Amino acid sequence: MKKCTLIPILLIIIFTATSSIAQDPSIQLGKGGITDIAYVADGTKLVVATTMGVKIYDAINYENIPIHTDKNRWITCIDISTDGNTFVEGDMKGGIYVWDANTLQHKKQIDNKTQCLSIAINAKMDTIAVASQDGYIKTWDIRTGNRSNFFGRIDQGVEYYTSIDYHPVQPIIAAGNTDTIIRIWDPQNEKIIHQMEAHTMPLTSIAFSPDGNTLASASLDESIRIYDFNTGMLSLVMKGKMNAVYKIAFSPDSSAVAAGCIDGTIHLWFVEAGTPIKTITGHSRAVIALAFSPDLRTIASGSQDGTIRIWNIASGKEVHVFHEHLGHFTDYDTGINGKTIITKTVGGVVSLWDVTTGKNLKVYNTETFNSVRCIAIHPNEHIFATAADHGNLMTWHADTGKRINEFKGYTHPITHIAFSPDGHTIATACEDHIIRLWNTDTAELKRTIRPITRNVSKLQFSPDGTTIAIAYSNALIVRLFPVDTGERPHVFKGIQGSIEDICFTMDGKTLAVSNGISEIYLWDVRTGEQNKKIRFTFHRNFYTVFNRDGTKLITGDRHGVLRMIDVETGSTGSPFGALNWGITGLTLTNDGNTLIISSMNGAISIRDSSKL
């Protein structure tokens, strides 16, 4: 079945769904990738920022607490007030929101045009500061919602702030930058008070101690640096056995600092002495979020392995783990029967999901899958294939996660994998421009398709497995190669704009090619002749899939809107659904009853297509 590769965070173009369309009622896989966490004032609740909205967990009974919020908003950062009663959050679409941390009610929206990388609320709880993606620090008056200051852009925006924090008493902001320098700002006068050469690599996290006497910074250079805030002098450097540090957090009494690292470990340090307390292990991917409980008994951590874990600080033992956050998805595939979906996340977690319920069935969460770049699942859904960066193609048992075969000989990264409908052949596209066809069972190379000087953008077998369609990025051609006969391929030319998607009818007789200028070309697979070109006026850059009988095309566009196109007449019906994010891929299961939709925020949703 067709799959797609989703777009990385820093390359995302943000688009807003049409507000008049009812929101999509589909099942979503997982609860979104974790981006930040914080405890509320009394420590009974944990606020989690995810790529699919704000989630709240009971930190005592470890249950999910439902709240009314937009599940599709990609929350990038949160901060909680010093009294723990208010939290603020920012998202990738530019929204800044204020919440009551006790009632879990959304109080107000401050802005809708600032894409947030880091957010902080001041001691008086009347001002919000944001490090925005355009390289500026911006502040807002919470009471009026008006922006008060706009400052701090460095080196014409080449560098940007990765982390900011308000001092717990004074109205000043500490900011860590990719240029490795810490800057202390007076936001009222938009001036730098202090500037400190901090690290040898980009800063990832910065934090004031709750008592305001200490400033800590963390970096990819595998260290934490502690500064005496009153003198501005470097007090000590914590290095030890840490790898690159992604996140730091102070204990409520300011005596300790915790560091979350790229290898999944958490390191606790005494601040005054600069000595290690303990190392906590359990995560299998980078720790990107940390928060101490107000009573200093536990620490919560969020990781790219898809879990939130609660740890007892005294013993270093795990108290509880939440497994639901297996997302932001970057690749997926489903078998012929469409019963399960295999997914890959930003953190390199490969997992299996039930299409009917949306429940996670298995996580292949080992070091083996850390660098997986693309995936595909066998039609019978008992085997899956992976390709890692600069690695060979491999197949695995879906039930056990054990490796079956390795397909050797690759010297460049593999970009696409596809199983033939009968499962006997695996096709790959590679950055060396060669298409390789392998025997699935023996790992023997069956055939190569000669290279051309263009990268492959789409790779798909026809439903009967006799033909493979290859679309070449920027070449504006699609080639149909007979898999076994070696006959000359059909070459589809004359496509305008750019090739966005390709799809076969279920009988394999027609191939649709959609472009970037609101056109769909229909080609006869047997003759190679163009049957029709459909033009329309809705948004460009869309993805398509035929319905079961081939009479209609389902399309999803960059604004997240779903539509149906009549193939015979070319007429478009009214939009029948919308996501809050642009659609990046559509797959229809073989029975025609289930539509799988991927979107720009890394979410994958499942919808009953029989009701469209």
Image: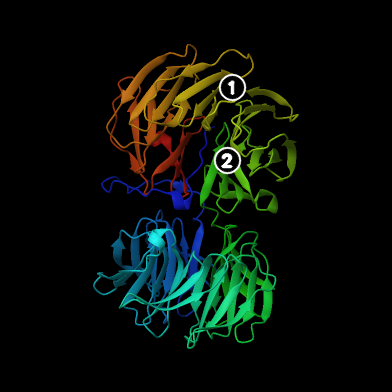
Q: Residues within 10 Å of mark 2 (few under 14, many from 20)?
A: many
Looking at marks 1 and 2 on the same chain, the residue that comes earlier in the sequence is marked by 2
Residue 141 as seen in the image, left or right of residue 243: left
Mark number, residue 208: none
Q: Amino acid at mark 1?
A: Gly
Q: Nearer the viewer, residue 454 or 130?
A: 454
Q: Nearer the viewer, residue 170 or 196?
A: 196
- Is residue 154 depicted above or below 456 in this figure? below
Tell us which disc is closer to us: 1 or 2: 1
| Amino acid under disc 2 | Thr
Residue indicated by mark 1: 465
> Residue 597 location, x and y as percent?
45, 41
Name which residue lies at 33% across and 23% down. Answer: 534
Residue 117 is at least partly visible in this image: yes
Task: Give how far apart the Cα atoms at labels 1 and 2 are.
Answer: 21 Å
The answer to which quarter of the image holds residue 298 is bottom right
Residue 266 position within the rendered picture, expressed as x and y whole percent measured from the top left: 63, 70
User: Which mark is on residue 340?
Assistant: 2
